[in-house]
Amino acid sequence: MLTELANSEYMSSKFQETLGKFEAFRAYWTHLQQEAGGVPPRSAFNPNAVRDLLPYISLMERRAADDLHVRLAGTAIDNLSPTPLTGRNYLEYCPPEDKAQYLDAATAMVEVPCGFLLKRAVTFRDGHVHELSSLALPMKDAAGEIRYLLSITAVKLDAAETQAPVGQYVAIRHIYSEYIDLGYGVPA
């Protein structure tokens, strides 16, 4: 899945390096999963264990079917967003035509549970279009209910790491998405 994405001929070497961060993120989550004997609790997430990944990490809480509350958004993610994401409903940033798909994905991730890989084309204020990829994985609350989505995001050409940021995005277009089997199956 991620290896195929990284080996795509149109990916820059810097983006391939960033996708290596996806593998590190997935390995960390899998370690937490093994320790928990199932979907890991959010309380097991230790930011110090993934310090190098923190600018690319976000944590969302599914508070209601139409409320994906962003509890944490890394600096690289916030630098690309029209406004800071932390404390906001992620769905406010979704294009209206894609909102149902994002709601369905969030529902599936907490019900099945499964991961979700998402690629989209993002148009920035300067007119440039970059590919944004995210991998989201579920986590449970203290009561055992799965309602947190921990994710990592990478931008093709590492727009988030350039000395002169491309600026906040003004439009998003869905390119590709797939559910990831974490040992519990995937939605039909």
Image: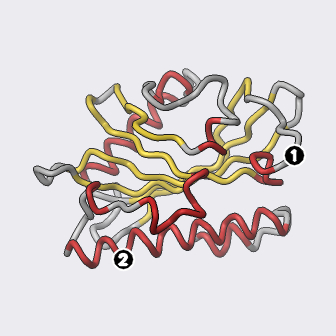
Q: Residue at x 46, y 54 (%)?
A: 136
Decide: marks 2, 1 in contact (CB < 8 A)?
A: no
Q: Which residue is mark 1?
A: 163
Query: Which residue is farthest front?
Result: 48
Q: Tell which of 186 and 34 is nearer to you.
A: 34
Residue 51 drawn at (x, y percent): 54, 62
Q: Which residue is mark 2?
A: 31
In the picture, measured across the screen, residue 90 lies left or right of residue 132, that is left
In the picture, measured across the screen, residue 167 lies left or right of residue 18, that is right
Q: Quadrant of the C terminus?
A: bottom left
In the picture, measured across the screen, residue 5 lies left or right of residue 183, that is right
Q: Tell which of 35 and 188 is nearer to you.
A: 35
- Say what secondary structure mark 2 lies in: helix
Q: Which mark is residue 179?
A: none
Residue 179 drawn at (x, y percent): 45, 58
Q: Is residue 118 above or below residue 2?
A: above
- What amino acid is at disc 2? His
Q: Is residue 28 above or below residue 76?
A: below
Q: Residue at x 44, y 64 (%)?
A: 180
Question: Label 1: few (<14), some or many (≥20) within 10 Å?
Answer: few
Query: Which residue is farthest left?
Result: 143
Residue 39 drawn at (x, y percent): 25, 64
Mark closer to the observer (2, 1)? 1
Instruction: Report the Cα–Cα distance between label 2 and label 1.
Output: 34 Å
